Image (cartoon, rainbow, N blue to C red):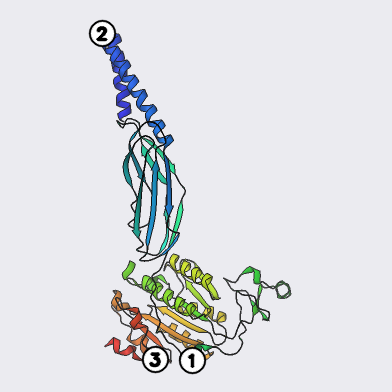
Amino acid sequence: MPARMAIAVTVMLFATGAATGFEVLSRLGYAVLGFVALAYVWARVSVRDLELTRTLSGARFAVGESVEERLAVRNPGWWPIFWVEVREPTDLPGHHPGHVLSLAPRGGAEWTVRTECRRRGRYVLGPLELRTGDPFGLFPQYRYAGTVQHLIVYPPLVALQEFHLWGGEMAGGRALARWTQQVTPSAAGVREYLPGDAFNRLHWPSTARTGRLMVKEFEPDPTSDVWIVLDTQREVQVGVEDDGTEEWGVKVAASLAMHFLNQERAVGLIAAAQRYDVVAPDRGARQALRLLEELALLRAEGQAPLPQVLNAESQRFGPAAAVLIVTPSLDLRWVQAAQQLTLRGLRVAAVLLEPSTFGRADNAFQTVGALASAAIPSFLVKRGDVLQRVLMSRGERVRSRLR
């Protein structure tokens, strides 16, 4: 708009000078025209010469950690840039790297932005947007610099050094015949393909013979697997954001997964969320990153109820496997499904998020009683609890927390 006004004034001066024969107006028109032309060239050259660099302290963070972003702008030209605005479009909460500065000829500026990661998820940074122009703002110019960068914020973790469950039963046992991502020297057999199985484990001769997709099973070392089943059905979730069962469930699942991985257990994950996520049991740092990334992106938008998930996925659980269920659901049908798993010799435990403390009227007394009757250890987590203390207690003591 200022540029249009300047051009309009120039035209008016030329038209008035020509109509009246007043030479001063024509000369003033030439002066304004030269001023406008100089401003336009100044703006174009300024935005063309600017150099911008950005350095991030990493691409993966955990809730509570800080993202450090260092930005530097340099003016390699021989004339000053009186103003330049740096913006960065982002959906990372609390991240505001914007800056307005002026640059001397052959000069530059640097600054650092630190942002605390508040919520898990995947976030986008950039590209950076530069806005500058002539000293009078007649011709603002825009330029994009850098590339789009993605950050992943992992869920918060709680150290569970004193979390003990099933006593010495978790130490190991006989060799297990089950599918694993790690190829071992001994193949145990084949079974029908299930969603989530890797295609490189398909056994084509059996597939051709049966007419159904079949996958190979291997015998791993004689150590029981740990499966974490996270209830992500939308209808059973209570509360919002950090005070909701979705975030608390993810935090519990992530902390349990890291606890067992630190014990060199093979840990798997099942979550029927916005998509059906199945992470086969494995161990090591690579599995830890995979689980944390899955949990970071998970949203409790699933439609499948927990009893259906347990019944459908029971084929994945090998003999003597351990199944940890994390849920806010008070539906007793999932307790019955969990009891069926115990009848097969599996070790089952439940972490129940007390929905009444997250905003729902019903309490978990009946569900806790059903778990006790089924001899399934349970842990009752209320909003605001210190997880290190709650998950140190065995399920037999959970009833006292209901009083």
How far across and down, in percent of the image, does residue 14 sit?
A: 31, 14
- Hey, which quadrant is residue 253 in on the image? bottom left
Residue at mark 3: 372
Q: Nearer the viewer, residue 116 or 68?
A: 68
On the question of residue 90 being in view, the answer is no
Q: CA distance from mark 3 to mark 1?
A: 21 Å
> Please, what secondary structure does the residue beneath circle 2 have?
loop
Residue at mark 2: 22
Mark 3 is surrounded, within 10 Å at the Cα level, by few (under 14), some (14 to 19) or many (20 or more) other residues, namely some
Pointer 3 with pointer 2, Cβ within 8 A: no
Q: CA distance from mark 1 to mark 2?
A: 105 Å
Relative to 356, 370 lies left or right: right
The circle drawn on residue 168 is: 1
- Compared with residue 11, is residue 324 higher up or lower down, i.e. above or below? below
Where does the C terminus fall, quadrant-wise? bottom left
Q: Nearer the viewer, residue 348 or 283?
A: 283
Pointer 3 with pointer 1, Cβ within 8 A: no
Number of numbered discs visible in the structure rendering: 3
Q: CA distance from mark 3 to mark 2?
A: 102 Å
* Pointer 1 or 2: first along the chain: 2
Relative to 145, 97 lies left or right: left
For badge 1, the amino acid type reads Gly
How far across and down, in percent of the image, does residue 179 sit?
A: 61, 78
- Hey, which quadrant is residue 108 in on the image? top left
> Please, what secondary structure does the residue beneath circle 3 have?
helix
For badge 3, the amino acid type reads Ala
* Pointer 3 or 1: first along the chain: 1
